[in-house]
Amino acid sequence: MSDKITGVGPEAQRERREQLRQLFTTPNEFTSSPLYRALSRTVAAEDGLLDLAGRGRHGQYPTFLFFGAVHQLLLSGVDHPLAGYFPSVVGPGRDAAPAEEAGPALVAFCEQYERELTEVISTRLVQTNQVQRALGLRFGLNTIAAQAAGPVHLIEVGTSAGLNLRFDRYGYTVGGRSFGDPASAVQLVAEHYGPGPLPDLDVLPDVASVLGVDLNPIDVRDPDARRWLEALVWPENHDQRALLAAAIDLTVADPPRILAGDAIDVLPGLARTLPAGEPRVVFHSATRMHVPDHRLAAFDAAIASLGETGPLWWLSVEEAPDPDPRPSPTRHGAALNLRTPDGERHILAVVEGHLRWVETFPAA
């Protein structure tokens, strides 16, 4: 396996390698994937694997991209012993080989398929479509319903395949209470914690239009693109994989409109196409984390530009709550943030990153 990062000098290569080593040494994101946690330790110990993981486009999260590429190749049907360690390949109801023993197979796999992995890592983007995050959108829209005068124009930044934009066609069960479409093939289930009441998630604003924006929109009608979405689901998450498949099947019949391009470039022009004075909602989840640091200010400014021609509600799930509104936090989660047209920021709830639980608290 090649041990150099193309186009990078020796000193920069060493620095980049150490940055990657740190990411793979403490892969906190893989909370529900024992396999990826075990394999991350193998990557951290192998310079060749670190350099392979570093061949992605700037701004892409290396751990997600590297394992997504490995997973996609295995899902395509390549015959290799590494497949036996992946529950997604072995299949539900069958035992995969022990995750702690998978390291040598990963090294051999990457040596054999270095060219194919490099092609995926260098060209693909991390475009996980966590359908469960539609719950965060619905939760935020419930609050907005009491504030917006008239139908809203909904825009999702980093929409991938636009599955969250079909939130109104899904069923939801939160803390044992049901909302949405009970007959939908897509049923999202989440736990409810905290002393705050759970709002009536069937109270939503009317929606005038929906639109997604993405650097590289995923066409759910393309089998190869669909496999990439499936590859970004962690191997052990069978339920999430089935949920993704159901959402794709539902969306194929009526995919939402998605604009291709960088949000920094697209959103200012888009603001001028929306009817002046009409409410608009922008939503993004686990998108800002992929924006390079030097472009974060421009990303935020582009979203704010949507409020230049009408009242803007800015809803996001990105980072831990700061400050945390819970007096004694016991669960690590992200803030469901809402910035209202007056510029005030409100934490509506603390949520698990994939929206598997929601913790509410009494309003201040």
Image (spheres, rainbow, N blue to C red):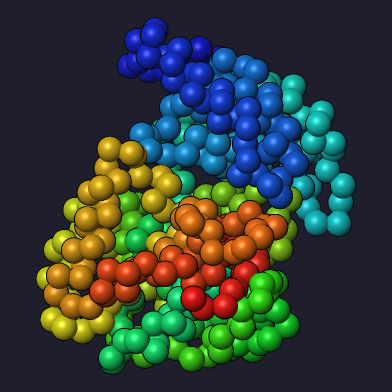
Q: Decide if residue 58 is on the left or right side of residue 44.
A: left
**Based on the displayed image, in which of its 4 quarters is residue 206 positioned?**
bottom left
Residue 303 drawn above or below residue 310? above
* Visible residue check, residue 160: yes
Q: Decide if residue 102 is on the left or right side of residue 314.
A: right
* Residue 15 point in image, percent of width and height: 43, 16
Depth check: 323 or 61 in front?
323
* Visible residue check, residue 79: no
* Residue 10 point in image, percent of width and height: 39, 7
Q: Residue furthest top?
A: 10
Q: Residue at x 68, y 26 (%)?
A: 41
- Which quadrant is the N terminus positioned in? top right
Residue 10 drawn above or below residue 217? above
Disc count in the image? 0
Depth check: 249 or 281 in front?
281
**Based on the displayed image, in which of its 4 quarters is residue 331 positioned?**
bottom right
Q: Residue at x 26, y 74 (%)?
A: 342
Residue 319 drawn above or below residue 142? above
Q: Residue at x 67, y 81 (%)?
A: 173
Depth check: 270 or 340 in front?
340
* Residue 242 point in image, percent of width and height: 67, 65
Q: Residue at x 56, y 16 (%)?
A: 48
Q: Decide if residue 193 is on the left or right side of residue 283.
A: right
* Residue 205 point in image, percent of width and height: 39, 89
